Image: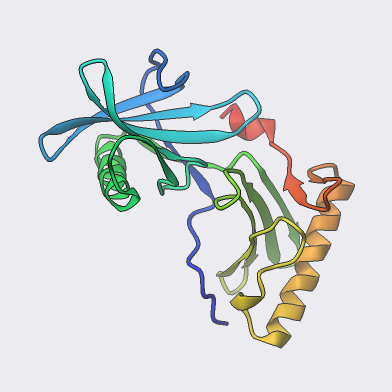
Amino acid sequence: MNVLKPFLLLMSLLIVMGCASTEPRTESSKFEFQFEEQTYEIIGLVSPDGESLNDLVLRDGREIVFWARDQNQDGAMDRVMRGDISLERANEIYKAGIRLAAEQGKYEQKPHPRTFEFVDEQYIYTLVTVMGDSESSYNLFSVYNIETEVETKMRDSNHNGRLDENQFESEEYIRWQRLYKRALEKGVNERRVQMTDEGTYIVLVDRRLTSQ
């Protein structure tokens, strides 16, 4: 199988350090670090409805010099909110901050809150909805073979129940699409996946994961 798009972890990347105040928005955690003689902040938030994000901020006193956002805590900045900095540069600084937080024991990986998982025979099926803006929002479908320890990850970029076709050869696509449809139907039947009026599929937040 030839997967054309790389996939990130099925985890939220959470900086774990004491609570702080506001700006750019209410925080659940904040980590300060030094990079190239500047002091940066990674500010993490998990909202009451289970959505999660990280902000990367550089300040000059009380003024924000730049502010970039990882819309879904997947380890990559999605957009620059304020300031003159490229997304590539923001990601370079962000990854350095995550690495330093990990070295200091102030970083952990948590299951994504919008996760639906079940086991059928020797396979573990996982559905994850990653919420962000239109370009960074998608469904991720993962199938793990317990016996062979092989995991296959697939993307539905439009949430419409159709896997992206450019990930597979034709016969493979038919097979994986059938399994994906079955997993979505199971999620809907168990009220873990919502089918919207627009025909999209959204995994509902698992409150057990947001309270860990």
Q: Does residue 50 lie above or below 195 as drawn?
A: above
Residue that extends furthest to the left in the rendered view of this protein: 37
Q: Please state the horizontal and vertical placement of residue 50, each as a whole percent of the image.
A: 62, 31
Q: Kindly identify the residue that appears in the image at 68 percent across and 60 percent down.
A: 124
Q: Please state the horizontal and vertical placement of residue 45, each as a whole percent of the image.
A: 49, 27
Q: Does residue 13 lie above or below 183 as drawn?
A: above
Residue that extends furthest to the front in the rendered view of this protein: 84
Q: Is residue 37 left or right of residue 150?
A: left
Residue that extends furthest to the top in the rendered view of this protein: 21
Q: Please state the horizontal and vertical placement of residue 18, each as a whole percent of the image.
A: 37, 18
Q: How is the image coloured?
A: rainbow
Quarter of the rendering occupied by the N terminus: bottom right
Q: Does residue 110 lie above or below 211 as drawn?
A: below
Residue that extends furthest to the right in the rendered view of this protein: 189
Q: Is residue 60 left or right of residue 10?
A: left
Q: Kindly identify the residue that appears in the image at 43 percent across and 29 percent down.
A: 44
Give the quarter of the image for residue 156. bottom right
In front of the other: 62 or 15: 62
Q: Is residue 42 left or right of residue 205?
A: left
In front of the other: 75 or 108: 75
Q: Is residue 46 left or right of residue 49?
A: left
Marks counted in the figure total 0
Quarter of the rendering occupied by the C terminus: top right
Give the quarter of the image for residue 180. bottom right
Give the quarter of the image for residue 162. bottom right
Q: Kindly identify the residue that appears in the image at 26 percent across and 15 percent down.
A: 62
